[in-house]
Amino acid sequence: MRNFIILMLLINPLSADGLKTQLNRDLQGVMTKVTDWRHYFHQYPELSNREYKTQESIAEALTEMGLEPNTDFGITGVTAFIRGQNPGPLIALRADIDGLPVTEKLNLPFSSKVKTTYQGNEVGVMHACGHDAHIAVLLGVASFLSRNTDKLNGDILLIFQPAEEGAPEGEEGGAELMLKEGLFEIEKPDAIFGLHVSNFKNGQIWTKPGPIMASAEAFRITVQGKQTHGSRPWSGVDPIIAASDIATTLQTIVSRRLNLLDSQAVVTVGIMKAGTRNNIIPSTAFLEGTIRTFKDSYAAQIRDEIKLIAENVAAAHHAKAVAEFQVYGGYPVTVNDEELANKYSSSLSEAADGDFFEARVPRTGAEDFSFFAKQVPGLFFFLGVNAPGDEDSPTNHSPYFYVDDSALSNGVKAFINLVEDFSTDFNSSN
């Protein structure tokens, strides 16, 4: 019997090793692929619901791994299953894949030169939020797991999700659409994990139990005045003055109308448009902005306040205003399952070699990972991708947002740690 065991170990010396141990051996090779993928997707970004080449490239990579990609969900989404050879849970791993209408100002060998039309304007396209890194990390994870199914307890659902930045106006998209089209009805995951890169210390990881990111929705206010010559403003109704007054008064919602001791909210005007010529007072003006909260009740109150302010401030200028909400849809609060966050913080810390922290307050950014996390227990975490030693790098959505490739190995390790640790605990409790 002893000789038989020795013979089996000689034939398959790694059979007793888990995924983490094997990844340590394979990490350099995995990261070579991750870097190549990241550079390719960074160079060729596409906007939300228009990620056709991105979808094709992801599907091609998965096929080369021996997987069967599915492109039936989310217009340009890609999903695939990795079937483990051992019993265990179904774990979903998610990466978003869309770029932003931002003209890149980094001078990299693989910088984006892509241009497109967005809201009637010619713009550059850039992976200014790091979704290229998310794609590459998850492809790296998929490549590793597909070669180590003998060590995988349970199955993996890979989700490459489009339109996280929001579908174009009048369209559906993103996580919400994928779920609407039945993604979790095929097989419902026992848990879902998601990663986001950001501008902080290289390789550092953080998360937070409970609310980790805000809800978000866009509002639009159209102000109707009366056109007249700029030299005779008394002959018309100036919608620009009314819109300016509305934009200023909106700032009193958070500072004067919500309970400072209880509320966390942001109301920001990001667009103001009106007019075609310097000496013509136009007939209309419009504002567009964002609402961020961590409580649905406050979002409802803010909508009421915006409507009240817009209509009455406009009336004071003899104009009329109409407020619209969720003009591009909306995202709920991203809430981490507290048990997952508390239990698997050690898995994330291990991936970051101890450079990990648990945040005390959530971020006011938003994520449509929130839709997935409303369906199954979810854990969303952040990975710092600044260059080593750089503590002050431009933030996400900046044309200068930079991802240092050396940080991405901790993202791969984080996913593998979560997969192994969660599946081990799942099997122990079932």
Image (cartoon, rainbow, N blue to C red):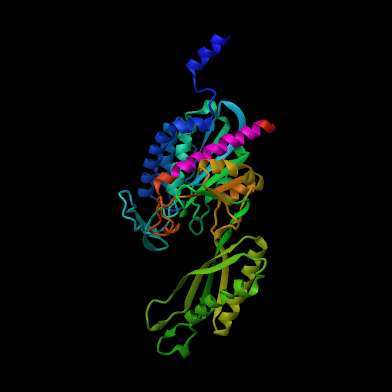
The spot of residue 303 in percent (x, y) is 62, 68
The spot of residue 206 in percent (x, y) is 54, 50
Tell whether 146 sits left or right of 326.
left
Number of labels in the image equals 0
Taking the magenta stretch, the answer to whether it contains residue 420 is yes
Seen in the picture, residue 404 relative to 271 is either above or below; the reply is: above
Tell whether 176 sits left or right of 390.
right
Quarter of the picture containing the C terminus is top right
The spot of residue 405 in percent (x, y) is 40, 45
Magenta span: predominant SS is helix
Viewer-proximal residue, 220 or 334?
334
Magenta span: 408-427
The spot of residue 207 in percent (x, y) is 57, 50
Quarter of the picture containing the N terminus is top right
| Residue placed furthest toward the right | 430
**Residue at 40 percent of width and 34 percent of height:** 29
Seen in the picture, residue 240 relative to 202 is either above or below; the reply is: below
Taking the magenta stretch, the answer to whether it contains residue 86 is no
Viewer-proximal residue, 87 or 332?
87
Can residue 376 be seen from the camera position used here? Answer: no
Seen in the picture, residue 157 relative to 332 is either above or below; the reply is: above
Tell whether 197 sits left or right of 302.
left
